[in-house]
Amino acid sequence: MKENNRSQNEVLTKKNSRKSNKKIGVAIVALVAVAILLSSLFAYVPVGAIGVMKTLGAPTGRTLPNGVHMKIPFIQGVENVDVRIQRLDVLCKAVSMDLQEVNSTIAVNYRPNANNVVDIVRYLGAQLYVEKILAPAIQESVKATTAQYTAEGLITERARVSAEIQQCLEDRVNPHGISIEEFNIVNFDFSEAFNKAIEEKQVAQQDLIRIQTEQEQLIVKAEAAARAAEEEARAILVRAEAQAEANRQLAASLTPNLVEYEKIQKWDGILPRVSGGNAIVDFRDNH
């Protein structure tokens, strides 16, 4: 009897346990259903994004600002488009006008236009417009512009090349509602042979500059020496002219004395004889 009662109690316990588990399962399912219903009743648009309302998967043309919004469960949905400035880095391969292979890294800051988010969702997809439009447009813009310059021109006219690539890119993506906020060429990378040729050219230019500088210095020294020689010759001439003038003046001052000296040298020591009180003695040379 005791064993039979024990068996009956165990059976009742198992039945009650199964009923409890069933009720718990039903409650959980109900809670999940309510949660799903509530989540499908509301949509959240995060900061920096614009929500595009969709009915049965198709954009309605209605946009939603940041915040929580109600929608029809299972019929309406919201696709968020981030309209903040974002950055995309792209590795591009191109060929220059002189057929040099050019690898470049391009950094682009971009954002979708707020007025075009509906078209972006309708025709491109909020997560695919970069892959479908922006990235290919960057590649094509780089190739088209690079082909118009020699490899050396890409280096020497980098600012102009960058501006032309950006303009080409904007022409391609603006019709799709994408704005280019900033464009930068991070670097140009050429083949090893071209880099070596550029290095050799730079060395040759430096040598040429050095030789020209040395030649200019020699010319300056030669001109300075010529000016010094000219000034010395002029000084010598001035001194010679001064000496000649001094000699002339000396000669002019000595001439009367020399005449008297010659008279004395020629006098024979005999005094002239005179008669009369008015006689005049003439010592001039009578010879």
Image: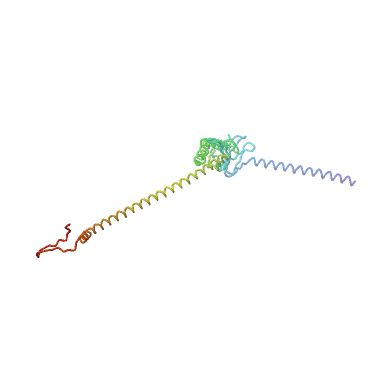
Q: Quadrant of the C terminus?
A: bottom left
Asked whether 169 or 164 is in front, the reply is: 164
What is the x, y in percent for residue 135?
57, 37
Task: Give the quadrant of residue 16.
Answer: top right
Residue farthest toward the right in the current orientation of the protein: 1
Is 274 drawn above or below residue 16 in the view shown?
Answer: below
Asked whether 145 or 78 is in front, the reply is: 145
What is the x, y in percent for residue 32?
69, 42
Left or right: 238 as drawn, with respect to 53 = left
Please say which color scheme the image uses. rainbow
Q: How many dots with numbers?
A: 0
What is the x, y in percent for residue 37?
66, 40
Asked whether 226 or 128 is in front, the reply is: 226
Left or right: 19 as drawn, with respect to 284 = right
Asked whether 2 or 126 is in front, the reply is: 126
